[in-house]
Amino acid sequence: MAGPQRPRWVLHIQAQFWRVLMAIGMILHRLAAPRPPAPSFTRRIPAKLSPRPGDITLHFYVPRDYEVHRKLGDKKFPVVVNFHGGGFTLGTATDDARWASAVVREVNAVCVSVDYRLAPEHPFPTAVEDGVDAVIHIAEHAAELGLDENRIAMSGFSSGANMAFTVPLRLQEELEAENSALEEEEEALTPAPSVSASTKAMSLGRTLVKSQKNINIAAIVAWYPPTDYTQTREQRRQTCSRMDQELPAIFTDLFDESYLQPPTMDMSNPYLSPGVAPLHMLEGLPQDIIMYTCEWDMLLAEGERMRRRLEDEVKKHVIYHMVPGVPHGWDKAPNPIKPTPGVQQHYYQACKELRRCLKSERRLSAGPRMSMSVN
């Protein structure tokens, strides 16, 4: 980050100011047809991974027959865990209600939108850790929630799309740490050196633990994600084809100063910049990745680099769409008179791919599985 850092109290005041204005903008956005639904119910869970105490609220959007099947226990729904945008500083879990509605309607899945904690109150890596807590909670409580822990997808918009990549990467670390503890226990009980089952599984992109409880991240849907914070904002702006359509510096400066703390931190950290993550970490991502970028976006170039790495270096199946003639966040325009053209069509296409990923048993069995102990 270039330039002098503003005091944290100044960032707090600015963030609160823009949160109020953004909330007004989202009210206008929700007035346009089709009107987005309210969450079916919410659940508040404690933050466990982060050293910063607090709570995370999960907003559930469910199919009409969800409650009947949940009570009967005769059907498990796939689940899409969603992370909203706003530069890790603004926004709420209900901002993506239209996307959640499309997921419920077109995929017949439950969409859980995560109200992760925001900067500057909670800088990096709190958002990512909150996302991992949300995924683990959903897996732990899948039975009571009527969800299929073997059919989980990630989705997100802007900074939330960054989290759609970084949350699975951070989840891998949790699983590997648990594995290491298990292996140490095994070594203490077994004097003869041997290659453990978990070590073999790691080489296959899996992690095995004592309980064999699986969390299967089947797919990622990332809408205009920032993926490389080793690039400065100035370098990013130089790649944008329409400078008049860029996010203003008043926002990007607030986002970066709020979330990227301390400013001397390593910007290549894979939980911040998945686009430059080591190959062995990218290999652990799900096989199916759906990416949308915007033609008039300073994040377009890094999104395309991320796509090439996923396809060429780790051989992921990437469905990629660059939406022409639109700026960053085009689907959230605060126009109460009419919806932004093309949004529902793109949502439908993304949901069509999600249907394939979440319902094809062959695809689920072929992709890497993340496993963890669930008690």
Image (tube, grey):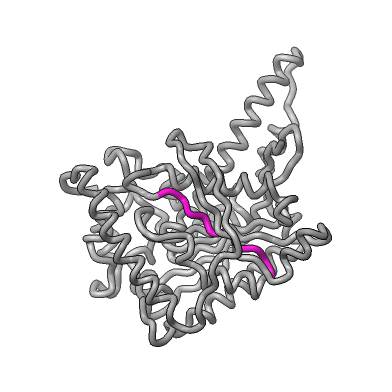
- Quadrant assignment for the C terminus: top right
Q: Count the labels in the image.
A: 0
Q: Residue at x 20, y 48 (%)?
A: 10
* Residue 155 percent across, percent down from the top left: 54, 61
Instruction: From the viewer's perspective, tell me whether residue 48 is left or right of residue 354.
Output: left
Q: Quadrant of residue 297?
A: bottom left
Can you name the residue that lies furthest to the left here?
A: 4
112 falls in the magenta region: yes
Can you name the residue that lies furthest to the top here?
A: 191
Q: Residue at x 50, y 73 (%)?
A: 321
Q: From where the camera sits, is residue 280 visible? A: no
Q: From where the camera sits, is residue 291 visible? A: yes
Q: Residue at x 28, y 74 (%)?
A: 245
49 falls in the magenta region: no
* Residue 358 percent across, percent down from the top left: 70, 63
Is 297 or 310 nearer to us in this picture? 297
Is 290 or 26 nearer to us in this picture? 26
Instruction: From the viewer's perspective, tell me whether residue 21 is left or right of residue 218.
Output: left
Would you say the magenta stretch is mainly helix, strand or loop? strand
Q: Which residues are magenta?
A: 108-117
Is 192 or 99 nearer to us in this picture? 99
Q: Residue at x 70, y 61 (%)?
A: 78
In the displayed structure, 261 sits above or below 310; it is above
* Residue 299 percent across, percent down from the top left: 36, 63
Q: Quadrant of residue 58?
A: bottom right
* Residue 53 percent across, percent down from the top left: 45, 36
